[in-house]
Amino acid sequence: MRHGKAGYKLGRTTAHRTATIRNLAAALFEHGQITTTLPRAKALQPFVEKIVTKAKRGSLHARRQVIATLGGDRRGFEWLFLPKKPTDQEKQAVEALAGRAKGFFDIPSSDQVERNRYGELRKAPRLVKHIFSNVAPRFADRAGGYTRIIKLGRHRVGDGGELVVIQFVGNEEGPEIGGNPSRRRRIADRRTAYAAKLRKAENKASPDAPAAEAPAADPAG
């Protein structure tokens, strides 16, 4: 029996599941938001939030804990690499990804990522340093709840897995996730707009200062 064995197995062995969650967490810390399936997002959310909570402490012990949780002080932002003579398509792809990530936090520049002549990664920023320097300070005044899960209302081709977006909070001014409002929301919005319209009409009908009443005519006159 599974008494007390909470969590998401994700159809994987322990080692495979751990590697999957670590890779998803690295992608989330690099891009600010990722698209994945609902079970993976629910398994990833507490994993990432515990890392941010540790990073907010800023101590050497916390840094070592985060490195152990991520499986090492891995390199990140490999997708920022541009060759010496990049094509327009390569530039546009990197600029699009970088523009979205900058909406969440500061990211390194492309010149900090280098590859050798064989395409092997030669230099890249460290992910743990990015977490402690750019991600954790954003949530210094927030006690938990650093991420949100938004359902996209569509399913993955092939297995029909429900697709969601998991992203860091605090980017409400940026691009919004598309989607149609529900019927209940549309009705509530119409009622709110109608009530506001009635209040506006009443305010126009009754001025702020009531007009002085004219004196009554003398019947004897």
Image (cartoon, rainbow, N blue to C red):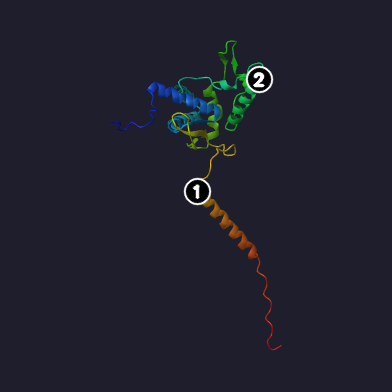
Q: Quadrant of residue 85?
A: top right
Q: Which disc is residue 183 wearing?
A: 1
Q: Which residue is mark 2?
A: 87
Q: What is the x, y in percent for residue 24?
A: 48, 26
Q: What is the x, y in percent for residue 58?
A: 51, 28
Q: Residue 52, relative to residue 197: is it above or below?
A: above
- The front one of 30 and 126 is 30
Quadrant for the C terminus, please.
Answer: bottom right
Q: Residue 32, relative to residue 126: is it above or below?
A: below
Quadrant for the N terminus, please.
Answer: top left
Instruction: Say left or right for 111 vs 158.
Output: right
Q: What is the x, y in percent for residue 128?
A: 52, 23
Q: What is the x, y in percent for residue 210?
A: 65, 69
The residue located at (46%, 24%) in the rendering is: 22
Q: Which disc is residue 207 wearing?
A: none
Q: Residue furthest left?
A: 1
Q: Which three-letter amino acid code belongs to the residue tagged 2?
A: Thr
Instruction: Say left or right for 208 vs 5.
Output: right
Q: Are marks 1 and 2 in contact (CB under 8 Å)?
A: no
The residue located at (61%, 30%) in the rendering is: 99
Q: Quadrant of residue 78?
A: top right
Instruction: Say left or right for 62 vs 94.
Output: left
Q: Residue furthest bottom?
A: 220
Q: Which three-letter amino acid code belongs to the residue tagged 1?
A: Arg
